[in-house]
Image (tube, helix red, strand yellow):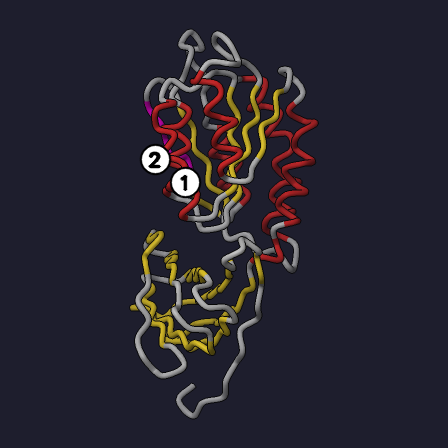
Amino acid sequence: MFDEINEVKEKIDEVFDTAMRTEDSQIENIVLVTFNDPDAELRTVTNNLSELKIALASIDVKGGAYCPEYSLTGLKLALQNSLPYSLVFVFTDASAADYTMFEEIKRLAVKKSVRIYFVLTGECRSVYDDDYQVYYKLATATHGRVFREHKGNIKDIMPYVIQNIRSRRHVLVPERHPQVHSKKFYFTVYGKNDTVYITIRAREPIIQILDSQGRNVETERILNLGHVLAVKLQPSQPGVFRGEATVTRQSNTIVRVFYRKRKETIVARYFKKQKSVNN
């Protein structure tokens, strides 16, 4: 994997610029995970290019004698630390020793509406074995894709990575609030049983959602990293919903709401700000 990692490093500036620096970027962060035999390591979760480069530089490619490898263990760790609607790219030159984790990985990815893309530069025995075909099964289940490339051709895939980041921006819609303890926001659900995801970036955030009748709406926690909270809700009726993000310590707060309709069509809606004497 030495050559593949170096090729990713060469393109990381462009990837980061696309993901984080453009004015309309909706990408919260970049998660970097490595896997070996049999461990996986979370290298960083960051929105800082310098931190990402340091994490990449710290990767020491060892071994290579083991085939297959525990790629799905690494993928699981990446999914656990990823926000809903993330794009996950897996680079590996080996089949999956832990291919029996397929159902677990599939459930976790589908729950978060994550797309998984595999860039494969080798296999252990046959491409028709279960430990290799699992990549195709996961890509299909998550509406991702598999690339089979020769070593040295990763640079040809990176423009596709960048384009996919750009094409996903319409899914998330941000609202930023500098230095607040509490912030109300409003959003409209147009279809019955549409799925709504909400992410809040702040210091130890707490969220409450009320429906148009003022009733509390139950949410399912998807992710809680202390500084990022992601929840999922499935309202039984359409209407205008009110949310309130509360933080234990005053901090900059970023709230994002995005939707998945029952027919799997992704729809973005802007928050509707409401004037209030309490705001």
Numbered disc in front, either 1 or 2: 2
Looking at the image, residue 244 sits to the left or right of residue 93; the answer is left
Task: Look at the image and tell me in which quarter the C terminus lies.
Answer: bottom left
Q: Are marks 1 and 2 in contact (CB under 8 Å)?
A: no
Q: Which residues are magenta?
A: 39-44
- Res 188 visible: yes
Q: Residue at x 52, y 80 (%)?
A: 273
- Give the secondary structure at mark 1: helix
Frontmost residue, 35 versus 123 = 123
Give above or below for 221 relative to 8. Answer: below
Frontmost residue, 61 versus 167 = 167
Q: Residue at x 48, y 16 (%)?
A: 94
Q: Counting residues from the N terminus, which is met first, the one under dot 1 or under dot 2?
A: 1
Give above or below for 109 relative to 24. Answer: above
Residue 16, numbered circle: none
Question: Residue 160 at x, y = what percent?
Answer: 67, 36
Amino acid type, mark 1: Leu
> Label 1, label 2: how many angstroms apart (C-alpha)?
11 Å
Q: Is residue 115 magenta?
A: no
Q: Is most of the magenta stretch helix, strand or loop? A: strand
- Give the secondary structure at mark 2: helix
Name the quadrant containing residue 147.
top right
The tally of labels here is 2
Amino acid type, mark 2: Glu
The residue where tag 2 is placed is 104
Frontmost residue, 50 versus 132 = 132
Q: Residues within 10 Å of mark 1 (few under 14, many from 20)?
A: many
Looking at the image, residue 209 sits to the left or right of residue 273; the answer is left
Give above or below for 256 relative to 7. Answer: below
Question: Residue 24 at x, y = what percent?
Answer: 64, 59
The residue where tag 1 is placed is 79
Name the quadrant containing residue 120.
top right
